[in-house]
Image (tube, grey):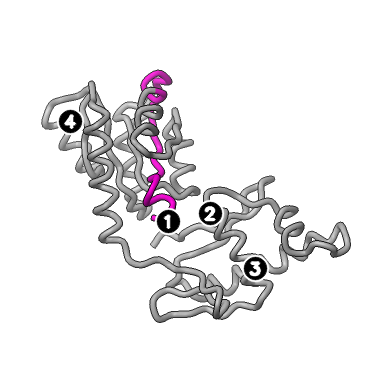
Amino acid sequence: MTQDSAVHPRVLVVDDDPDIASVLARGLRLKGFEVATEPRAASAADRLRREPFDAAVIDVMIGSESGLDLVAALRAEGHRLPMLMLSALTEIADRTAGLRAGADDYVVKPLDLDELAARLHVQISRAAETRPAGPELDDATRQLRKGAAGLDLTEREFAVLRLLWEHRGGPLPRGEIFDRLWTGDAPGAENVVDVYIGYLRKKLAARPEFGLEIVTIRSRGFQLRETVS
């Protein structure tokens, strides 16, 4: 978790019923969570792969899709964020199926928001305790560091990585990077951003222990994200 997410954990609610999703989102926001919603398994999987969430609350049935299959697929890819199943099903076999799919907990409808918030906090705290220390940027040495390991960067490489680091929740447009770091340079030279993105990609690919990569989000820009180990 980032320092901000430790104060306002970021949760994705996956439910095809807009009324339930809205109630959950409003209730969890009142409990101090930052909440996003998705009505489909495919779009939820895409966001969980691309964006930094601290936990997900996933309905067992997402329309005609299976929330169990969504959880199982994400676990098979190596995603470790806490996932809580939400369902009106109360049979022990149903709950067991959710846990076997890889869910960390199972909440039965009708649910109590205080209980859901408490369960989320417990799972997020457990995940933080077991998660290895992540990489960090050292402005003094202009390095990317993880434990005793350090990756040396040029001044411009560090500046580009710092911008991407500060916008890890989504893609950063090429033009914005250019305007922020190359102010005063000749217009139309935005391809210099691609050059430095290329330098950073090579350095990060050569040091997989840092667990970071830069991906291109089509028509939207570049995004720094964790690699799946």
- The first of marks 1 and 4 along the sequence is 1
How crowded is the residue under tag 1: few (<14 C-alpha within 10 Å), some, or many (20+)?
Answer: few
Identify residue for label 2. 168
Q: In which quarter of the image is the N terminus?
A: bottom left
Nearest to viewer (mark 4 / mark 2): 2
Nearest to viewer (mark 1 / mark 2): 1
- The first of marks 1 and 2 along the sequence is 1
Q: Do the residues labelled 4 and 3 touch (CB within 8 Å)?
A: no
Identify residue for label 3. 159
Residue 16 sits above or below residue 117 on the image: above
Give the image location of residue 68, x and y in percent.
29, 36
Identify residue for label 1. 2
Give the image location of residue 90, x and y in percent.
15, 25
Q: Identify the residue at image location x=60%, y=72%.
A: 202
Q: Do the residues labelled 1 and 2 touch (CB within 8 Å)?
A: yes
Q: Identify the residue at image location x=17%, y=34%.
A: 95
Q: What amino acid type should be assigned to the residue bearing mark 1?
A: Thr
Secondary structure at numbered mark 3: helix
How crowded is the residue under tag 3: few (<14 C-alpha within 10 Å), some, or many (20+)?
Answer: some
- The first of marks 3 and 2 along the sequence is 3
Q: How far apart are marks 3 and 1 (CA)?
A: 20 Å
168 or 15, nearer to the observer: 168
